[in-house]
């Protein structure tokens, strides 16, 4: 070993939380995927209806392979629903579809946090890929290469900022989704409780991801200072 990482213990609680969050979202989605909504409308149909009467009416809807891979692509203006969601009339599927439609509406309305997240995405993506290699090289060579650690910390800070900004974007999309599902009558009050549980579980994964990123940044700073 090149060095003793005295900060490693800090990862244990957030790793446990991350594993729990991933397990929670999968189990909650599976549970409510088996509960068919009283409206019987499919997720794709619901998303189309939501977008039709919104500022995002020019957004297309498509399929994407995988499970829980649903997302909105702002560059191509395509709302992609996964195979387990697209044709499903379940409470879980409607919640996910409405959530992604919420992102499309955010984009159409110029929602500030989404615009900021899209603005810093290229820097955050570049930074997250390069930060750790630079930091690790600087850590190995010690104080003489401290500048590399500083650059790594700076680049990773952009990734952490991106993760933090993602939180209000996701929370806002979920609030929009639940409001739309209620107003359009796609889900009744009892069914909305289930949809809220699905979206809350999904939000927990973003909280876990942000916590992990923040802890990693804090560890980098501690390790850098220990080599001063």
Image (cartoon, grey):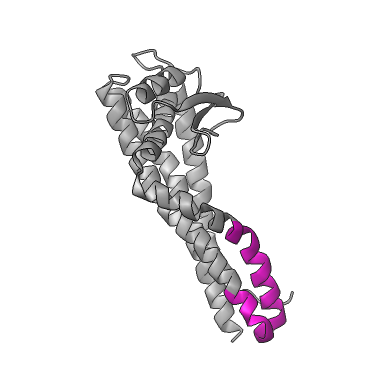
131 to the left or right of 97? right
Residue 207 place in picture, x, y as percent: 43, 51
Residue 201 pos. (x, y %): 42, 40
Residue 148 is a magenta residue: yes
- For the C terminus, which image quadrant? bottom right
Q: Is residue 225 above or below residue 71?
A: below
Q: At which x and y percent is residue 94?
A: 40, 24
Q: Write the residue at 37% across / 39% down.
A: 106
At 43% from the left and 46% from the top, the residue drawn is: 204
Query: Which residue is most to the right?
Result: 1
Whether residue 28 is visible here, answered yes or no, is yes
Q: Position of residue 187 (x, y in %)?
A: 31, 21
User: How many circles with numbers are drawn on the protein?
Assistant: 0
Within the magenta stretch, is there residue 140? yes
Judge by depth and name the residue closer to the eye, 79 or 210: 79
Provide the residue span drawn in magenta. 126-150
Identify which residue, 58 or 130, lies in the foreground.
58
Q: Is residue 6 visible to us here?
A: no
Q: Quadrant of the N terminus?
A: bottom right
Main secondary structure type of the part rendered in magenta: helix
């Amino acid at each position: 070993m090149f060095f003793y990482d005295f900060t490693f213990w800090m990862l244990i609680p957030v790793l446990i939380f991350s594993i729990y969050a991933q397990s929670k979202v999968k189990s909650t989605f599976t549970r409510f995927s088996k509960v068919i909504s009283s409206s019987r409308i499919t997720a794709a149909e619901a998303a189309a209806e939501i977008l039709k009467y919104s500022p995002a009416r020019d957004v297309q809807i498509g399929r994407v392979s995988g499970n829980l891979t649903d997302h909105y692509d702002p560059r191509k203006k395509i709302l992609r629903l996964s195979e387990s969601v697209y044709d499903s009339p379940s409470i879980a599927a409607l919640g996910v579809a409405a959530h992604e439609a919420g992102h499309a509406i955010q984009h159409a309305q110029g929602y500030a946090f989404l615009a900021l997240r899209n603005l810093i995405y290229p820097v955050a993506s570049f930074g997250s890929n390069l930060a750790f290699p630079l930091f690790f090289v600087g850590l190995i060579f010690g104080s003489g290469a401290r500048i590399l650690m500083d650059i790594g910390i700076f680049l990773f800070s952009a990734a952490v900022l991106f993760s933090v900004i993602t939180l209000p974007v996701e929370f806002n999309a979920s609030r929009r989704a639940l409001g739309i599902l209620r107003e359009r009558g796609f889900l009744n009050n009892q069914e909305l409780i289930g949809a809220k549980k699905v979206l809350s579980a999904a939000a927990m994964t973003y909280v876990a991801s942000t916590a992990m990123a923040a802890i990693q940044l804090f560890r980098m700073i501690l390790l850098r200072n220990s080599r001063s």
